[in-house]
């Protein structure tokens, strides 16, 4: 007997950011709608809508540490044929020893957990090291960083994943030596971060999110084009080694816990735990019932002009929100530049009927 499937799937998450780029398929839109009603029955009401881009407050981050998440790849260069070493019928082959091709290890590292911020640069480190003793030198010819986004769209039991990509950095025609002929094995050589440090993420990248029918996650792809050889004899064979590592993209709008932690660290109190947004009130002991003591009579005022004015406080007591946020910075923080292209149907929504 076939039973009907329950397609109701609810996920409790913060509000997702504004999202477009998938016409007639998926969209997340925020707008303000205003309607002015006119009493006359033969007159139409005025109505308009104003779209705005929304970025959510990012989740609470783990305090900064020295751990790193990484993606690693190992590669061994193939020996290149050398015409000078071929056996000829007119001369003897050269007996000069040749150095073995290098075996390298490539690391891409991000702070742990792997989190990047919208409209900010990548906190990335790329390390290359030789694993064997050889006099051959590894040269960097090309370098590219691409952020890949996967948008998962769900409708009932049907799912589809759309792939998007953003080129963060792409450099070619390089001749950068990674070390020299005397570089020992197992020594890390870090690539110059100037190739990507001055290039922030595009402002069209939305933060990572997940809803009932729509979600977005990211991967960072790092590609290195490498050759090897000596200073005067570089082998022409080019090998491209890609690295992929998952990461999360945050909006950059700090939460209240992060703002409180940053202020405590600035005041030399980083070792304290962040206070909860709603502190529990201290218990008040209940007095045992008994006879009520007589109350003292109120003093009689002789000046009627000031009667009742001296009892009033100078300022009203602070509200609960003011008392909680007295020592905190603004909860919104800096706003990042964020743009999403409007769909063709949006132009019709802003028209007044």
Image: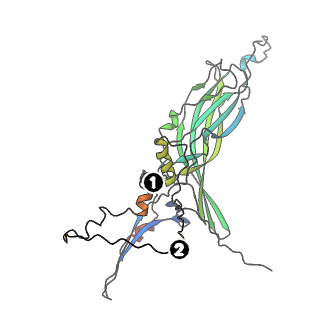
Q: How is the image coloured?
A: rainbow
Disc number placed over residue 277 in the picture, else none: none
Write down the residue under mark 2: 289
Residue shown at 55%/52% (left/top)?
60
Nearer the observer, 46 or 175: 46
Question: What percent of the width, then of the height, locates residue 102?
Answer: 71, 25
Where residue 338 is drawn, which disc sits there?
1
Residue 61 seen in the current view: yes
Element marked by disc 1: loop
Crowding around mark 1 (Cα neighbors within 10 Å: few <14, some 14 to 19, many 20+) is some
Percent of width and height locating residue 61: 56, 49
Earlier-in-chain disc, 1 versus 2:
2
Q: Are marks 1 and 2 in contact (CB under 8 Å)?
A: no
Q: Quadrant of the C terminus?
A: bottom left
User: Image check: 155 left or right of 119?
Assistant: right
Residue positioned 30% across, 87% down in the render? 40
In this rendering, position of residue 124 left or right of residue 242? left
Residue 137, image quadrant: top right
Is 203 drawn above or below residue 239 in the view shown?
below
Determine which quarter of the picture holds residue 288.
bottom right
Residue furthest to the bottom in view is 41
Residue 255 can be seen, yes or no? no
Q: Is residue 250 left or right of residue 244?
A: left
Q: Is residue 251 above or below residue 109?
A: below
Give the quadrant of residue 310.
bottom left
Front one among 51 and 302: 302
**Residue in the foreground of this view, choosing between 284 and 280:** 284
Question: Observer-nearest residue: 44 or 114?
Answer: 114
Q: Can you give x and y, in whole percent of width and height, for residue 77 in the image?
A: 71, 29
Decide: few, some or many residues near mark 2? Use Cα within 10 Å; few <14, some 14-19, many ≥20: few
Q: Please give the name of the residue rendered at 63% of the width and 59% of the height, measured from the top-left corner.
A: 161
Quadrant of the drawing holding the N terminus: bottom right
């Amino acid at each position: 007997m076939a039973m009907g499937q329950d397609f109701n799937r609810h996920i409790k998450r913060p509000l997702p950011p504004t999202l477009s780029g998938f016409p007639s398929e998926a969209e997340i839109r925020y707008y303000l709608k205003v309607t002015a009603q006119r009493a006359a029955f033969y007159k139409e009401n005025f109505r308009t809508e104003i779209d705005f881009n929304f970025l959510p407050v990012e989740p609470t981050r783990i305090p900064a540490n020295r751990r790193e998440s990484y993606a690693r790849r190992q590669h061994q260069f193939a020996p290149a044929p050398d015409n000078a070493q071929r056996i000829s019928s007119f001369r003897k082959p050269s007996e000069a020893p040749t150095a073995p091709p290098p075996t390298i290890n490539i690391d891409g590292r991000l702070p742990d957990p792997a989190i990047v911020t919208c409209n900010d640069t990548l906190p990335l480190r790329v390390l290359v090291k030789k694993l064997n003793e050889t006099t051959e030198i590894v040269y960097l010819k090309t370098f590219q960083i691409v952020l890949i986004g996967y948008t998962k769209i769900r409708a009932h039991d049907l799912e589809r994943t759309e792939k998007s990509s953003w080129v963060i950095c792409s450099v070619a025609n390089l001749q950068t030596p990674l070390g020299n002929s005397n570089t020992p094995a197992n020594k890390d050589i870090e690539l110059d971060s100037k190739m990507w440090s001055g290039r922030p993420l595009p402002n069209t990248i939305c933060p990572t999110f997940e809803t009932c029918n729509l979600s977005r996650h990211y991967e960072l792809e790092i590609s290195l084009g490498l050759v090897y050889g000596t200073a005067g004899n570089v082998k022409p064979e080019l090998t491209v080694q890609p690295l992929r590592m998952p990461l999360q993209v945050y909006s950059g709008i700090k939460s209240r816990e992060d703002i409180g932690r940053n202020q405590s660290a600035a005041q030399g109190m980083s070792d304290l735990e962040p206070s909860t947004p709603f502190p529990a009130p201290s218990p008040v002991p209940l007095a045992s019932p008994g006879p009520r003591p007589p109350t003292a009579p109120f003093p009689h005022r002789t000046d009627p002009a000031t009667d009742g004015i001296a009892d009033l406080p100078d300022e009203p007591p602070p509200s609960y929100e003011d008392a909680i946020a007295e020592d905190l910075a603004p909860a919104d923080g800096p706003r990042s530049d964020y743009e999403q292209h409007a769909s063709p149907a949006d132009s019709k929504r802003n028209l007044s009927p």
